[in-house]
Image (cartoon, rainbow, N blue to C red):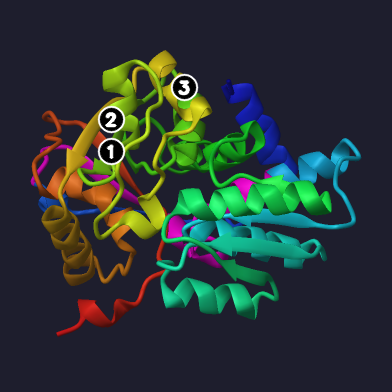
Amino acid sequence: MITRTDVERAATRITGHVRTTPVARVEPGIAAPAGELWLKLEFLQHSGSFKPRGMFNRILAARETGELPAEGVIAASGGNAAVAVAYAAKTLRLPAEVYVPTTAPAVKIAKLRQLGATVVQHGSEYAEAYEAATKRAAETGALFCHAYDQPEICAGQGTLALELLDQIGELDTVLVAVGGGGLMAGVAAALDGITRIVSVEPETAPALHAALAAGRPVDVEVSGIAADSLGARRVGTIAYDVAVRTGVQSLLVDDEQIVHARRLLWDRYRVAVEHGTATAAAALTSGAYRPASGERVAILLCGANTDPADLVG
């Protein structure tokens, strides 16, 4: 379990290693709410997603306690967590080995290699890459950095929410895309008792939605256009516990709605994000979430490691 205190400690620890990303207040025409709409432009973070917040916190916390081995770090990811750990490792001058599924986008693989990480493509899903990475970590003694289900990872991701409050003050609702749930867990812990958190997932990758329905994390089938970043078969234990404790609302959107939201973000605001990120916006554009009159809503635009070619024309 993580709390706001854990997030505040993470914010102190990672200061100087991550960017303060901007927010933009936009006209509410994206879904015609009668209140205020803000976009948190977290895709401008180092490595193109929110993930360095958690990775720096995980690695620096291990260094503080003397648990950071000379062998460096290992991670498994659909792409963004791998890029983040590679970036953090390069910054901190550590070796990094990353495992990604064979379905990971070429743009993410290219970035990993540019950052100097050893890249291993294994399996067609995140779960298969994860199994191989944990086995390798046990063999080498390297520090395993989970994509979403370690306390330091979740707390680091939650620093985004503290930053958001500092930038725009009081908010009624934050919309966040969920895969394994690390970002949602950190944000919900940071804003517990302050702001409503609405999780948004693809219908074809409903790990949190299924867990809340079952009363525990369960395996789900994963497919669809956003599976490269929201492709966890099972929501993290930390994320599930935080969601239950804080009353996170869960919504589902389909692939067509995700594609539409991504294109609309580009057409209206010239914001190019990946499909997983657009999933959060799809809650508004599809009408799955309808703000009340006067409601202050923020959408976390959390990643942009995507090929923008299909946004033009």
Q: Quick one: label 2, few (<14), some, or many (20+) residues within 10 Å? A: many
Q: Dot 3: what SS?
A: helix
Measured from the top left, where is residue 118 in percent x and y? 69, 71
Q: Quick one: label 1, few (<14), some, or many (20+) residues within 10 Å? A: many
Q: CA distance from mark 3 to mark 2?
A: 14 Å
Q: 72 left or right of 203? A: right
Q: Dot 1: what SS?
A: loop
Camera-nearest residue between 312 and 180: 180
Measured from the top left, where is residue 42 in percent x and y? 45, 55
The answer to whether residue 190 is seen in the rendering is: no
Camera-nearest residue between 212 and 62: 212
Q: Dot 2: what SS?
A: helix
Q: Magenta residues, as a range?
A: 32-57
Residue occupying image coordinates x 43% and y 35%: 184
Residue 209: mark: 2
Q: How many marks?
A: 3
Name the residue beneath numbered marker 3.
242
In the orientation shown, which residue stands out farthest toward the bottom?
A: 313
Using the rendered view, name the quadrant where residue 278 is placed.
bottom left
Q: CA distance from mark 1 to mark 2?
A: 5 Å
Residue occupying image coordinates x 68% and y 49%: 135
Name the residue beneath numbered marker 1.
206
Q: Are marks 1 and 2 in contact (CB under 8 Å)?
A: yes
Measured from the top left, where is residue 87 in percent x and y? 66, 65
Amino acid at circle 3: Val
Q: CA distance from mark 3 to mark 1?
A: 17 Å
Relative to residue 104, is residue 250 depicted above or below? above
- Of the image marks 3 and 2, the number of the one nearer the N terminus: 2
Residue occupying image coordinates x 13% and y 28%: 292
The answer to whether residue 179 is seen in the rendering is: yes
